[in-house]
């Protein structure tokens, strides 16, 4: 066991070291954080876009890093982050969505001097710009270039939406064979994506809910979207018609208007990938 | 059942294993801390400035606020599960009875899930004008205990007051199914946050250990264990059969009520603190009975010690195997416990039918 009884001359030496350490840590806090953990795919995307890639030391399991990025430790799912696993990475800053947790982990992290930044899931372009601002000041990276790029994308999306003669009725589903369809309502990432692309979400309930067969007819979707992770399973929509023959009676079913959207653009609200995906989606919606 | 250790060797063995296990648990984790720093870190945390220990501040925090409460909660909850398993097996006079299998944990789970979904702090504040917010931390254990008590009572009555093993197991299956449906329904109406809480919690996890949870479950365990240990001779008499126990002067009805209420409260508190952790209540009493025999005077304290040991070891594995991430400990105990349960069934297959 290494310990020493306080002796007078040593004590003052310790004091000097302590004061020096305080000054050092003070100046370190003022500089840009060098050790950042990011939890949530869309947040990590923003960190990388802001040029914070060099300071990124760990990510959560929902994050998909670019193929050429260096491998990083994975600290578990963003909703149940283990506090010691995070502390072991010796981070200065943890950034993530407002669903990041549990609360006890965040509390203990803050007590040990780690800054925690929680960003709300962006439902609109304005909220995304706000998130970029908050993240850029936490990372101490300039945001102007990205903000300009995002604003441009939002503007062109708005113009493209107006160009649509009549906003198409769009339904986003998650399907399971024999268990029917779940549709994404308000407050979900697909809902934001549909609105960005200039469509109208056919359902207006909150969150994901099971759809009854008859409701499907009533909703009259012009387009049906599903996540790319289901694309293979749904055989680009033809499996949906098999599982739910009533779909053939909807406008989307008659025309075979099924579209797959990038699953990673649907995580954690509107992110940079969602803007790109909204553009692609808008082009497809305008095609017919 | 011939393999038995004498009391003289089993108790020191258990205590030694507990000490070693606790030290391993304190020393192991995602953050690498040398054993010297574990000691000095803990000293520094408990009495900062006592001796001039040369350890990083962060070690003190990790040890004092994360690993130590987690270790203690593991010991206490594991002990509670072991104790409740032993009592259940005594109540039903069957080694297959376990709080998980006969639906007590599931009942407690429904009670807790109800609170998680409908009585979040915010909902209570708007509902009762802040009257209940101060009592919110009590609501979860209370609801879980109530759910646990209800299902214990149901199993007990359906199982012909504990006499019919088959009925009891069937009742357990039915209650587990019903509880599963109820939790499914709650999942359906829950918002995102509540959904996360329920899922996290069904898998069992010691990650949320706080000093408050430690104090609460310790209090319940001490009271329950003390009350039950005092009735150990009566529990022994009950092993002979109900009428025999009655002839020996035991108030069987009151004893059984005591057992049901105490198990339900203890299970409720444990479940509300860490979620559902299966099979410790089954494996531990059975092993202890094999090692030391069925005498409740020894069985009860040994089950508390061994249950704590098992859960602490499982939790240490859960948080180091996939570090820096973590596994839910409930999955590990189930992997450990399910083969054991199959072995038990194999052994008893002639007795059941």
Image (cartoon, coloured by chain):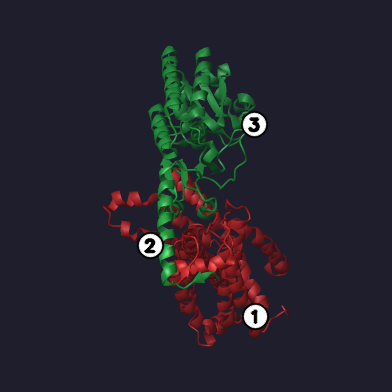
Quadrant containing the C terminus of chain B is bottom right
**Residue that numbered label 3 is attached to:** A233
Label 1 lies in what chain? B
Residue B78, percent from left and from top: 55, 67
Which shade of the palette goes to chain B? Answer: red
Which residue lies under the disc numbered 2?
B138
Give the class, few, some or many, for how many residues have Cα within 10 Å of label 3's Cα (few <14, many ≥20). Answer: some
The image quarter containing residue A162 is top left
Question: Chain A hue?
Answer: green
Provide the residue designation for mark 1.
B10
Chain under callout 3: A
Left or right: B262 in relation to B7: left
Tell me the SS state at disc 2. Answer: helix
Q: Mark 2 and mark 1 in contact (Cβ < 8 Å)?
A: no
Q: Residue at x 43, y 51 (%)?
A: A25
Q: Taking the image as drawn, is residue A206 in sight?
A: no
Q: Quadrant of the N terminus of chain B?
A: bottom right
């Amino acid at each position: 066991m290494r310990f020493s009884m306080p002796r007078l001359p040593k004590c003052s030496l310790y004091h000097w070291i302590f004061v020096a350490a305080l000054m050092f840590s003070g100046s370190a806090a003022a500089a840009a954080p060098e050790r950042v953990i990011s939890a949530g795919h869309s947040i990590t995307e923003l960190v990388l876009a802001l040029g914070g890639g060099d300071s990124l030391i760990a990510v959560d399991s929902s994050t998909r890093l670019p193929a050429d990025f260096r491998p990083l430790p994975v600290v578990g799912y963003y909703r149940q982050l283990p506090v010691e696993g995070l502390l072991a990475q010796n981070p200065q800053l943890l950034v993530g969505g407002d669903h990041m947790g549990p609360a006890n982990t965040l509390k203990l992290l803050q007590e040990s001097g780690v800054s925690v930044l929680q960003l709300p899931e962006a439902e609109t372009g304005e909220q995304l710009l706000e998130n970029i601002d908050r993240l850029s000041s936490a990372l101490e990276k300039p945001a102007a270039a990205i903000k300009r790029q995002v604003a441009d994308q939002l503007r062109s999306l708005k113009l493209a939406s107006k160009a649509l003669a009549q906003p198409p009725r769009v339904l986003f589903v998650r399907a399971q064979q024999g268990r029917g369809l779940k549709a994404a309502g308000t407050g979900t990432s697909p809902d934001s994506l549909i609105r960005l692309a200039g469509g109208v979400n056919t359902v207006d309930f909150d969150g994901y809910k099971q759809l009854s067969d008859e409701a499907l007819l009533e909703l009259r979707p012009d387009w049906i979207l599903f996540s790319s992770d289901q694309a293979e399973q749904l055989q680009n929509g033809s499996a949906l018609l098999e599982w739910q023959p009533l779909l053939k009676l909807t406008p989307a079913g008659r025309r075979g208007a099924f579209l797959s959207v990038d699953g990673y653009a649907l995580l954690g609200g509107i992110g940079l990938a969602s803007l790109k995906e909204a553009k692609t989606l808008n082009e497809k919606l305008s095609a017919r | 059942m011939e393999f038995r250790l004498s009391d003289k060797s089993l108790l020191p063995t258990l205590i030694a294993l507990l000490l070693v296990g606790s030290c391993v648990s304190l020393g192991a984790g995602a953050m690498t801390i040398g054993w010297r720093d574990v000691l000095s870190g803990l000293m520094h945390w408990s009495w900062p400035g006592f001796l001039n220990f040369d350890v990083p501040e962060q070690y003190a925090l990790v040890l004092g606020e994360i690993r130590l409460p987690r270790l203690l909660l593991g010991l206490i909850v594991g002990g509670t599960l072991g104790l409740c398993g032993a009592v259940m097996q005594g109540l039903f006079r069957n080694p297959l009875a376990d709080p998980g299998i006969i639906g007590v944990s599931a009942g407690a789970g429904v009670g807790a899930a109800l609170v998680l979904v409908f009585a979040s702090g915010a909902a209570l504040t708007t509902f009762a004008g802040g009257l209940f917010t101060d009592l919110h931390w009590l609501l979860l254990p209370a609801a879980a205990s109530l759910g646990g008590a209800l299902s214990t009572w149901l199993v007990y009555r359906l199982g012909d007051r504990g006499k019919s093993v088959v009925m009891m197991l069937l009742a357990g299956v039915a209650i587990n199914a019903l509880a599963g449906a109820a939790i499914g329904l709650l999942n359906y109406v829950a918002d995102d946050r509540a959904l996360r809480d329920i899922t996290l919690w069904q898998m069992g996890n010691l990650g949320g250990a706080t000093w408050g949870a430690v104090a609460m479950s310790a209090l319940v365990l001490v009271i329950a264990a003390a009350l039950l240990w005092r009735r150990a001779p009566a529990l022994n008499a009950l092993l002979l059969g109900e009428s025999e126990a009655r002839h020996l002067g035991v108030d069987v009805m009151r004893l059984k009520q005591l057992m049901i209420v105490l198990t339900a409260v203890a299970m409720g508190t444990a479940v509300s603190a860490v979620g559902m952790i299966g099979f410790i209540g089954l494996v531990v009493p059975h092993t202890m009975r094999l090692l030391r025999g069925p005498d409740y005077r020894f069985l009860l304290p040994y089950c508390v010690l061994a249950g704590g040991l098992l859960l602490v070891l499982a939790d240490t594995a859960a948080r180091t195997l996939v570090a820096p991430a973590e596994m839910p400990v409930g999955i590990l105990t189930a992997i450990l416990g399910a083969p054991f349960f199959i072995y038990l069934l194999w052994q008893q297959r002639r007795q059941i039918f």
